[in-house]
Amino acid sequence: LLIFFTLLTCFNSKNPFSKTPLKPSSSTHNKSPTPQFVESKMKISPTLNNPVPRIAYLISGSRGDGESLKRTLKALYHPLNQYALHLDLEAPPPERMDLVDRKS
């Protein structure tokens, strides 16, 4: 029975394990391939009157990084930018509140 099944699958023309090469489709075979780029399909939104870009920052720290976060924010600050400040759970509440109360 095993020999019969092996012979049957070897001579079957619709064998999924056959090593016949795939034929290219007629539509792609006749035409030269043209590259498709995402950039050609993108629509660029109109820019603002201000040439300064708007940037979003995520500034993260841990215990003892409150002063470092303040210096980083002061160095990066621009009114058009967006900022997210993060202190992880190791930072004590007074350090968090000091960062929140910072006005300058």
Image: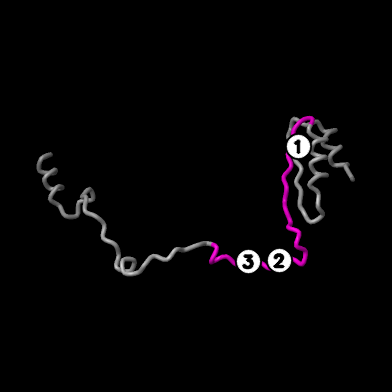
Secondary element under disc 2, as helix, strand or loop, is loop
**Viewer-side label of 1, 2:** 2
What residue is at 63 percent from the left and 66 percent from the top? Answer: 44
Residue 87 is labelled as 1
* Residue 45 screen position, x and y as percent: 66, 66
What residue is at 77 percent from the left and 30 percent from the top? Answer: 63
Residue nearest the viewer, comparing 34 with 12: 34
Which label's residue is closer to the chain start, 1 or 3? 3
Amino acid on which the number 1 mark rests in the picture: Leu
Secondary element under disc 3, as helix, strand or loop, is loop
- For the C terminus, the image quarter is top right
Residue nearest the viewer, comparing 98 with 32: 32
Q: For mark 2, does the 10 Å Cα neighbourhood hold few (<14), some (14 to 19), or many (20 or more) residues?
A: few
Examine the image and state in which quarter residue 42 appears: bottom right
Q: Gap in Å between the C-alphas at discs 3 and 2?
A: 9 Å
**Viewer-side label of 1, 3:** 3
Q: For mark 3, does the 10 Å Cα neighbourhood hold few (<14), some (14 to 19), or many (20 or more) residues?
A: few
Which label's residue is closer to the chain start, 1 or 2? 2
- For the N terminus, the image quarter is top left
* Residue 78 screen position, x and y as percent: 81, 52
Q: For mark 1, does the 10 Å Cα neighbourhood hold few (<14), some (14 to 19), or many (20 or more) residues?
A: many
Q: Is residue 80 above or below residue 42?
A: above
Amino acid on which the number 3 mark rests in the picture: Ile
Q: Which residues are magenta?
A: 39-64
**Circle 2 is placed at which residue position?**
47
Magenta stretch holds residue 29: no
**Circle 3 is placed at which residue position?**
44
What residue is at 30 percent from the left and 65 percent from the top? Answer: 25
Q: Gap in Å between the C-alphas at discs 1 and 2?
A: 34 Å
Q: Which SS type dominates the magenta stretch? A: loop
